[in-house]
């Protein structure tokens, strides 16, 4: 079976470039934001897997000067952060929650985003498990850093552990939605889970 060639720019890649965004993934976040009202002025946002920075860019435009977007990625951002952006080049598995709070100058975040993706090897089961591990770490950080009532958007590859991971989100949020943005590639196994309304911290 031939693997999809993602090296050639498609409609969404060209559109992102024309509008000044670093990656086509910006439209995935934009679509979910438009349908579910994730972002607004003054919000504190954590973006995991931020590089090359298109989600940070979109979010920083939506939260405005009184908000802040903190991005984390093992790779460099590749551009100068805006005044309401903070970027930490770090591994999401080792970054300290307190460092993220300090970067936001806040006790907690209103929204945690994760577009983290594993280094795929072309083996569906292995790639799925790696994706779930990243998603679970994003959920762990959301558990620690999201204020009660906050929201969580995370990418995960479909596979055998998908339902179990969705159940973990259901334990922590009042409502869970499955999102497959139109700008996702048709043959991609990625899907987004949206947790709305984080429950009060459990004992």
Image (cartoon, rainbow, N blue to C red):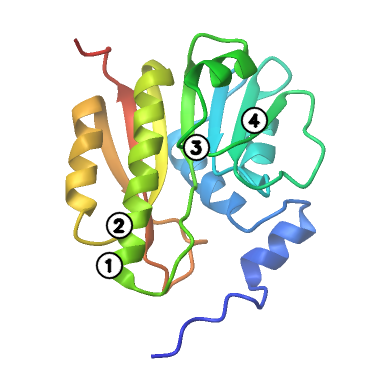
In space, the residues marked 2 and 4 are separated at their CA atoms by: 33 Å
Quadrant position of residue 139: top left
Q: Nearer the N terminus, badge 3 or badge 2?
A: 3
Of the pair 141 and 56, the residue shown nearer to us: 141
User: Which label sits on residue 179?
Assistant: none
Q: Is residue 178 visible?
A: yes
Q: Quadrant of the N terminus?
A: bottom left
Q: Measured along the vertical axis of the image, is residue 124 above or below residue 119?
A: below
Q: Nearer the N terminus, badge 1 or badge 4?
A: 4
Side (left or right) of 74 relative to 143: right
Helix, strand or loop for disc 2? helix
Q: Nearer the N terminus, badge 3 or badge 4?
A: 4
In the rendering, at what x and y percent does residue 198 appear?
31, 22
In the rendering, at what x and y percent does residue 45 appear?
55, 26
Within 10 angstroms of label 4, few (less than 14), some, or many (20 or more) residues? some
Helix, strand or loop for disc 3? loop
Name the residue that disc number 4 marks: 62
Q: Are marks 1 and 2 in contact (CB under 8 Å)?
A: yes
Name the residue that disc number 3 marks: 92
Q: Are marks 1 and 4 in contact (CB under 8 Å)?
A: no
In space, the residues marked 1 and 3 are separated at their CA atoms by: 22 Å
Name the residue that disc number 2 marks: 129
Q: Measured along the vertical axis of the image, is residue 79 above or below residue 201?
A: below
Q: Is residue 193 visible?
A: no
Q: Measured along the vertical axis of the image, is residue 43 above or below residue 131?
A: above
In space, the residues marked 3 and 4 are separated at their CA atoms by: 24 Å
In space, the residues marked 1 and 4 are separated at their CA atoms by: 37 Å
Of the pair 3 and 34, the residue shown nearer to us: 3
Name the residue that disc number 1 marks: 125
In the rendering, at what x and y percent does residue 190 appear?
39, 60
């Amino acid at each position: 079976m031939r693997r999809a060639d993602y090296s050639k720019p498609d409609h969404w890649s060209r559109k992102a470039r024309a509008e000044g965004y670093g990656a086509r993934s910006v439209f995935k976040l934009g679509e979910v934001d438009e349908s579910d009202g994730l972002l607004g002025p003054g919000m504190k946002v954590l973006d995991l897997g931020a590089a090359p920075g298109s989600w940070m860019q979109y979010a920083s435009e939506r939260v405005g000067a009184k908000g802040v977007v903190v991005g984390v990625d093992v790779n460099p951002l590749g551009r100068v952060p805006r005044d309401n952006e903070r970027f930490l080049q770090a591994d999401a598995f080792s970054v300290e929650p307190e460092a993220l709070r300090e970067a936001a100058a806040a006790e907690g975040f209103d929204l945690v985003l994760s577009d983290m993706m594993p280094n795929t090897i072309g083996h569906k089961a292995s790639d799925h498990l790696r994706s779930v591990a990243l998603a679970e770490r994003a959920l762990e950080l959301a558990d620690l850093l999201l204020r009660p009532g906050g929201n969580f958007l995370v990418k995960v590859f479909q596979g055998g552990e998908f339902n179990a991971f969705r159940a973990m989100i259901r334990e922590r949020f009042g409502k869970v939605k499955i999102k497959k943005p139109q700008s996702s590639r048709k043959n991609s196994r990625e899907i987004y889970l949206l947790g709305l309304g984080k429950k009060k911290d459990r004992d």
